[in-house]
Each structure stands twice: as C-alpha cells, then as structure tokens.
Amino acid sequence: MDFSFTEEQLMLQDVARRIAQEKIAPSAEHHDRTGEFPLDNIRLLGENGLMGIEVPTEYGGAGMDPIAYVLAMVEVAAGDAAHSTIMSVNNSLFCNGILTHGSEAQKQKYVRAIAEGEAIGAFALTEPQSGSDATAMRCRAVKQADGSYVINGKKSWITSGPVAKYIVLFAMSEPDKGARGITAFMIDTDKAGFGRGKTEPKLGIRASATCEIEFNDYVAQPEDVLGQEGEGFKIAMGVLDAGRIGIASQAIGIARAAYEATLEYVKDRKAFGAAIGTFQMTQAKIADMKCKLDAALLLTLRAAWVKGEGKRFSNEAAIAKLTASEAAMWITHQAVQIHGGMGYSKEMPLERYFRDAKITEIYEGTSEIQRLVIARNETGLR
Ligand code: CAA
C-alpha cells in the first residue's frame, strides 16, 4: 500500500491551496455576512481547472483523478466552505453525471462551460415534500406525440439555483413505475417555462446561493434526456455516490481549518499561569480532533481510490461522508469550546466553521441515509 501522492496530485493541491489562502479565505467573512455569490472566485477556480477536476482535457477539464479531487476540495473548503459547495456541485453532481451518462453532444455543450468556469451548474432532485425519500417526487415530465416532454413542478434546496445556467433535473415520466419511472433531463435556465423562487436564508455556507425552482410547461426535447428514459433514479444515486466524496472532502477542509486555528490558540492562550495546551483536558481534545481528522481523510481517500479503479464505491462513499461530516461537527464544536468567548464571537472564523459544518450532515444524503446505505450494504437486508 502506497500512501504517497503523485506529482500531478500535489501540484493541483498546491494550486487549490494558493487560491484558497490568497483569494478565498480573505473574503470568506464578507461572503458569509452578505451572502453575496462569489462569482469572480468561482471563475478563477474554473480557469485553474478546479471546476472540472476529473473532466478530460478535451472537454475543458483538468483530466485528473478522484484523489486529486479530494485534495483540492479539502484546500478550497479550508479557505471557505461556501466556495467548496459550489465547486462540489459543479464537479460531482453536474459534470460527473454527464460524463458518465451523457451523449457526445451533451458533453461538449454542458460540461465544457462548467469545467472552464464560464457557467454554473446545478442538480435538482429534492422537492418541498421529498428529500431523503427521493422517489416520492411530484415533478412530472409528460411525453408528447412528437417525442418532446412537457415538465411541470417544483424543486427545492437547489444549490447554485439562483445563478445556474444549466441544471440536471430529475422528473417522474412514468409515475406507475416508481423509481424506474424517473428520467433525467438537461435544463437550460434561459428557456421559457423555467422560473426561480426566493433565495433561502441559511445557517451556514451562506454564499452558496440556494433557491426553489419551478417548471411551468417547460418543453424538453428528446436530445435533452440524460441517459435513457426511466434511468433517472439510478443516475441520481450514482452521481450522489460521487457527490458524497466531495462533501466528505468539504467536511475535512472545514474541520482542518478549525483544528489548525485551535492548535495555534492553545499555544498562545494562557490561563492559571500556563498555555491552555498544557492542560490534560485540552490535550485530550486535541488528540481526539487529530484522530478523527486523519480517519476521515483516509476513509475519503479510500473511497476516491475505489472510484478511480472503476469499481462500485457506494459503500465506501457513504462511510467516508458519514465519518467526515460527523467528525467536522464534533471538531468544530470542540474548537469553539476551546476558544471560549472568542469561539462564539464573529471576530474569529470559529463560529462560521461550526455553522458551515452542520450542512455536511444533511445534504447529499443525511447521516441517517448514510447509515441506511451502509447497513444495507453490510447485511444485504432491506
Ligand atoms: N448506484 C446505482 N444504483 C442504485 C444506487 C446507487 N448508489 N442506489 C440504489 N440504486 C438502484 C437500486 O439498485 C434499485 O435498482 P432496481 O430497481 O434495478 O432494483 C433502484 O436504484 C432503487 O433503489 P432502492 O430500492 O434502494 O431505493 P430506495 O427508494 O429504497 O432509496 C435511498 C434508497 C438510499 C434511501 C435513496 O433514496 C437515497 O440515497 N436518498 C437520499 C437522497 C439524497 O441524497 N438527496 C440529496 C439531495 S441532493 C443535494 O443535497 C444536492 C445539493 O444541493 C448539494
């Protein structure tokens, strides 16, 4: 077993770290406070190959592997979680699904624009009444005699929804068939019949714009179908497997930023005549933070490695996401506690890390769904 990274992986990590530390981290407080979408930084990430890391160069991407994706995501998330949310959706949920299931024309049209950072992509599965139970969707795509589809319905919690040019949409085309009646469509948000609702005010990742979207007699052509009719649920699940590696990496980045800030603080902060890092209660927290951080990273790299081998990685991705997101929540909680009043103050980024960490336990499959996926895989029972 080889734990070293290739030169290319380290180079991409370095590019991501430089942009994250020089451009993203300095404006993170502003983006968190105002909720302003960081378009310039997203373009910069795109120009440097970070919006299509696993996208082959012929479609405008960096042509790298899933390990490189993990390393780069961790760096960007350590700079600011909201930026890494946008990056994760563009890379994993948007480009990945089209690369795996799209036609050549779809790859040329949709993947290039997103991978190069010229446009933003989104993924629309969730609805107001269906989150974890994704097959309970009500959005309908009714096939017409000429082969086109008329789409009606609402999708909610759409990351980058307010700014996305293209969206991968999942709609029920044959309701009687349940999961096998769902079809995936490529949506152009400039076309008639597409609308956006209000932007959601959120606890964390505030600069990653999130909104409801609506379809009123939106017409999709047969060439807009992604994969085959009725294959949408499996496409969504496969794409979410990849997405979960992205969210695990995001959680690690947030946790690492909180951990590194804490390491500095415990050396500087004095109480009872000594640095608080010399107290056993603080030392125990530091040791546990480091163990959880390393475990999360190794499990996430394992999931990325299995993906890179071209094997099914649903279980490894769920294990990585569950472990990393719960580690991030725990580590940021401890970091706030060790910083005391300063951890609670907006003068330091600790409270932001704490708020940002929470979403990693919710989106792209809650911790409960990850446990369900893992237990089903381990037992073979349903
Ligand atoms: N890859 C490929 N196929 C898969 C799969 C996977 N990972 N998981 C399931 N399937 C297939 C099954 O094999 C089955 O196929 P057959 O019909 O041929 O047997 C079919 O899909 C249905 O599977 P299940 O019976 O297991 O489906 P289920 O209804 O029991 O649901 C679930 C399973 C795991 C609960 C699933 O619904 C799930 O993951 N829910 C969570 C949804 C989610 O993650 N939502 C996040 C929203 S997106 C988001 O957050 C994005 C953002 O903005 C950042």
Image: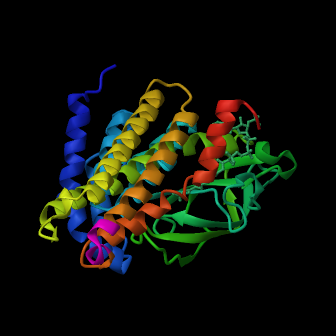
Q: Quadrant of the N terminus?
A: top left
Magenta stretch: dominant SS?
helix
315 in the magenta segment: no
40 or 257: which is nearer to us? Answer: 257
Q: Quadrant of the C terminus?
A: top right
Residue 227 in view of the camera: no
Residue closest to the far front: 272
User: Horizontal and vertical percent for residue 190?
Assistant: 53, 66
- Residue at image position (69%, 36%) is 376
Q: How are the colours assigned in the image? A: rainbow
**Which region shows up in magenta?**
337-343
User: Horizontal and vertical percent for residue 306?
Assistant: 47, 28
- Residue at image position (51%, 66%) is 161
How many marks are shown on the rendered structure? 0
- Residue at image position (31%, 47%) is 290
- Residue 349 lies, with reference to residue 144, above or below; the image says below
- Residue at image position (20%, 30%) is 7
